[in-house]
Amino acid sequence: MTVLRVALDLPLHRLFDYTIDSATPADVGLRVRVPFGRGERIGVVVEVSENSDWPLAQIKPAIEILRDIAPLPAEFFALCNFASTYYQAPLGEVIMQGLPVGLKRLDPPLRRQARPTRPTLAARAPELTDEQSAALAAIDLAGGFSAHLLHGVTGSGKTEVYLRLIARALGDGKQVLLLVPEINLTPQLEGRVRARFTEASVVSLHSELAEAARERNWRAAFAGEADIVLGTRLAIFTPLPRLGLIVIDEEHDQSFKQQDGMRYSARDVGVFRAHQGNIPILLGSATPALESWANAQNKRYALLTLKERANPEATLPAVKLLDTRKMALKEGVSEALIAAIKERLARGEQSLVFLNRRGYAPVLACMACGWVSRCTRCAANMVLHLADRRLRCHHCGFEHRVPKACPTCGNQDIHPFGRGTQRLESWLQEEFPEARILRVDRDSVKNRKQWEVMLERIHGGEADILVGTQMLAKGHDFPKLTLVGALGADAALFAADWRAPERLFAQLMQVAGRAGRAELKGEVLIQTQYPDHPLYAALVAHDYPGFAATLLKEREQAGFPPYTFQAMLRAEAPEMADSIAFLKAAADLPVIAGHQNVMIYDPIPMKLSRLASLERGQLLAESPSRPALQAFLPRWREAIEGLRSPSKLRWHIEVDPLEF
Ligand code: ADP
Ligand code: ZN
Ligand code: ZN
């Protein structure tokens, strides 16, 4: 009798033993059907053994080992083990979330044949700039592990560096993993990759793919048939037998961090994976994450810099601040910005007005009794969406019709307060009746198809004024766009979240980068009441390094990451008192006394304290030493697992949390 140690997709930090008539160590990494509870499940064989900690008679027999694909390799398990240990996530969950849904189902769907890719004419590569050549020369594909941070201003030709590097890796017979924040927002990049490498097999892996397509692409990657895997964060776990290079574009982007289930950073897992596979990794951004920048400063990453735009005709836009303290505003828009838009209209050029808040207005309120449109399930306001006359909670998705009168006092005079993109759009339409205005946000663009249509319309010159959120900030070339106006940016300057300025700077840099990509000179006008703020001074000077240095000094003085290492314990329950009591108990566990290098703070309610009818609290654990924190976390987690808690309470630990 042989024992299989099986990983199952369960929130438990243990493996499950099953017996089988015959199995060999070569079966490690295969999927297996096993009985579980009253049903069956698919798991993965992690170990084949002669014995078990359980009496053999009590172990259930496995049903069947599945042999339709090759066993998952040892590197895959090593990567999952790392992620499991580092993020305190159950190994079974980590392993199973790395597999496409189709391979985890008991009844596999019928498979369609892969569509042959159409050969197209290969796009010609431009001659490299000196800066691009220097960056490329610094990366040695045959030299084993190395981590590089490519810091290049928008339009400096970072993508071209990726493409050249990918070409070299393909020439060496290697596979390449190229991660992007959101594939749907970057069809241009996918197009450029496919156009450059017409001979190579390019597959994409992201959550919007249909299940069958995702499985097909995963199999091609796993079998070594795909040469380039273009994916979002989930693709970082894909086993790739010939992997020779990892590239992470827009490495600062928050979407590389998974915020639910297993909370991991695909960028950080990527660096570990490159290390493990002894290959180079390239992280690219115009505004690197401060953590990455600090790693470049302390030489853990090699810094490569592109200071100039690749196209010599395209200069960086002139960034100017509009001091709104001294200006009359119409619907939040200054005369100066209105005049600048008029100029563009007259010249047949495009303008973009950036406001990172969708909907018509952030809240609806009654002046008579003080009623505001609160979400009944969250500690948040319901946002007014006039386009379809709904009030909508952007946190839990709850929505209902806009009331005709105040629900508390019956007053019919209820008003929207503040403004979002819909309100801005309708006002601009009144102000510029002749202009063709396109609003671009998650309400007007819900999927990839709509996004492609939208991009085509913008490129086709069908819009004079774009109104949009940060969706528009991602790497797109809009050749006729010469003006960017930014509204409402100040809000992030004094936000409670100490990462808000870093994000604001990145967003404004990105959106500013949309202006003046081609021959037409671009101008960026930022409305602010704080024109002397160092963040804006750095933007005007296009000075990311200066800004990063200032922020890093502040973080060091305040003892924030990357100068400390953090993990957050969060609990949610119908009553806040239960969440806080649980966290308090976790803060008082005796195991903590044995770890002097770790500091535990007091439990507090989360900023968004109530979400979808659950009251949420958090408890921060912090250490000046990564190894000290890592040594502490598993012991703390085990002790927390032993705590009694109300049945409706849920908790998790997030390592390196980004949001508070
Ligand atoms: P980034 O990724 O840094 O924003 P891109 O790679 O998209 O920049 O390049 C910006 C623009 O410059 C693109 O239109 C691209 O085709 C062009 N470009 C890139 N490299 C060169 C080069 N060496 N010579 C001329 N044009 C280039
Ligand atoms: Zn009222
Ligand atoms: Zn809500």
Image: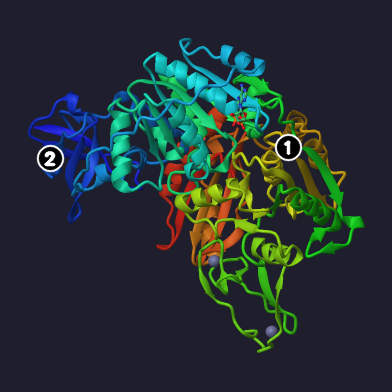
Nearer the observer, 99 or 561:
99
Label 2 amino acid? Glu
Mark 2 lies within 8 Å of ligand 3 (Cβ measured): no
Q: How busy is the neighbourhood of tag 2: few (under 14 within 10 Å), some, or many (20 plus)? A: few
Indicate whether 232 appears above or below 427: above
- The residue where tag 1 is placed is 520
Q: Residue at x 58, y 49 (%)?
A: 619
Residue farthest bottom in this picture: 410
Q: Residue at x 37, y 39 (%)?
A: 94
Nearer the observer, 582 or 514:
514
Q: Is residue 657 left or right of residue 641?
A: right
Indicate whether 334 appears above or below 293: below
The numbered dot on residue 361 is none
The numbered dot on residue 64 is 2
Q: Quadrant of the N terminus?
A: top left
Q: How busy is the neighbourhood of tag 1: few (under 14 within 10 Å), some, or many (20 plus)? A: some
Q: Ligand 2 lies in which image quarter?
A: bottom right
Marks 1 and 2, Cα distance to the nearest angstrom? 65 Å
Q: Residue at x 40, y 62 (%)?
A: 647
The percent position of residue 406, horizontal first and vertical second, equals 65, 84
Please, what secondary structure does the residue beneath circle 1 have?
loop
The percent position of residue 324, horizontal first and vertical second, equals 86, 55
Q: Are marks 1 and 2 in contact (CB under 8 Å)?
A: no
The percent position of residue 169, horizontal first and vertical second, equals 43, 17
Please, what secondary structure does the residue beneath circle 2 have?
strand
Residue farthest right in this picture: 326
Q: Earlier in the sequence, mark 1 or mark 2?
A: 2
Please tell me in which quadrant of the rendered image residue 206 appears: top left
